[in-house]
Image (spheres, helix red, strand yellow):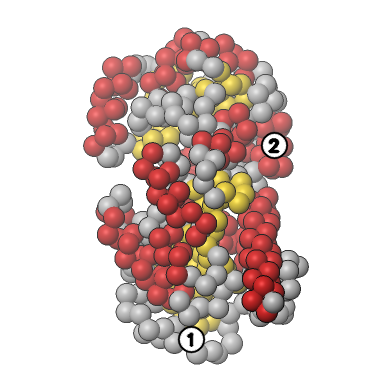
Amino acid sequence: MSAIVSGPAKQHPVDHVWGRALVKGRATGRPVDGLSDDGRGSRPLRIGVIAPPWFELPPIGYGGIESVVADLVDQLSDRGHEVMLFGAGRDRTRATRFYSTFATPPSERLGTPVPEVIHAARAAAELRNARVDLVHDHTLAGPLLAYGRRVPTVVTMHGPVLGELGDYYAALGDAIEMVAISSSQRRLNPRLNWVGTVHNAIDVSSFPVRTHKDDFLLWLGRFCDEKAPHLAIDAARAVGRRIVLAGKCVEPAERAYFAREVEPRLGPDVDFVGQANAGRKRELLSRARALLFPVQWEEPFGMVLIEAMACGTPVVALRRGSVPEVVSDRVTGVIADTPADLPAAIRAAELLDPLACRKRAQELFDLPVMAAGYERVYRSVLARVAAASSTANGRSVA
């Protein structure tokens, strides 16, 4: 199947049959061939990015990792790098070249192994002869193929790094260069081959900021024990505030949790609005007096935390996972040690300055900050690989 080319006419033969390659004409006017002697410098890089196959890029609705990947691809492209992106379905990013491994994302099979294995294999087949400086993989199965790759593979840890997953990444050893999305995640398993920490980010400018809030609290997430909306209801009720619950509740485990913990607590002071799309989410976040985040596990990063801060809305959260490094206590939110401390934390958070929340989001969690962090990781990895290669060549000559 031939590639579709925009811009100057070029021939880009594609030998796969599962999807199509979309090549987008974008002249940077800068050289892209070869590495500098030490792998450093300002020359644009050629980066192969492998996204998960479950949703389009960017996703229309649900799809947290896909959102992060799409935003990173756009930022890297804007910084002058050439990005070869692998995903499923349509592409609406600014990648230089896009390879669709599935004509339609297999969303209904999320969590099953075969689609992701097929996705990894098809991406690897294209990368075998691709001229890239490194590969940045965001999938579970993809890192298995790093061993046979001639260029480094950077892998972002979007989920847990303990238990069986920790054993998996430890077994891969130095075949992959691992990036944490928070320092707390990295501390959970220091034996892994960590090469950097880069916080997730959002387009802060796309979130409306309001300094005058409505008279309700907000919980936003996925209905499960780990996210604990039942604790948010209890805390809001203890201070006499109405709470709005907005979140995903479609899978059997989510429905079972809702029936067990949420339904018995429903009342006139609890407003369940279902899953919020991008526009509805921004509306709710900007209007709420505070976002409640009573997390019950060591969550490596909570995107909703920085989304709330971007809207000038303080966060009331439990001290778990990345919360202490994302939320500035008594500045952009209040961190509680136990669920019993949440009511007092709500009262304190309502006194905080919304503009301080927005300022921290802009300074630490805006998209250019994340892109610059990954670029530093890429250049550091390439410099180390170049230095090791130079040393090895010197020894062989000797």
Q: Quadrant of the C terminus?
A: bottom right
Q: Which residue lies furthest to the front in this view?
A: 398
Residue 82, quarter of the rendered image:
bottom right
Q: What residue type is labelled 1?
A: His
Residue 246, quarter of the rendered image:
top left
Q: In this view, does 45 lie above or below 15?
A: above
Q: Where is residue 112 in the image (x, y as percent from the top left)?
A: 27, 52
Left or right side of 9 for 273: left
Which label's residue is closer to the chain start, 1 or 2?
Answer: 1
Q: Which amino acid does label 2 sit on?
A: Arg
In the image, what residue occupies the spot 35% across and 30% down? 224
Q: Position of residue 245 (x, y in %)?
A: 41, 28
Residue 102, quarter of the rendered image:
bottom left
Q: Nearer the viewer, residue 332 or 132?
A: 132
Q: Is residue 216 above or below residue 273?
A: above
Q: Circles 1 and 2: CB distance less than 8 Å?
A: no
Kind of element beneath mark 1: loop
Q: Name the residue under label 1.
A: 12
In the image, what residue occupies the spot 59% across and 62% down? 74
Q: In which quarter of the image is the N terminus?
A: bottom left
Q: Which of 103 and 50 is in front in this view?
A: 50
> Dot 2, crowdedness within 10 Å: few (<14), some or many (≥20)?
many
Q: Mark 2 points at which residue?
A: 360
In this view of the protein, can residue 69 be seen by the observer?
no
In the image, what residue occupies the spot 40% across and 45% down? 167
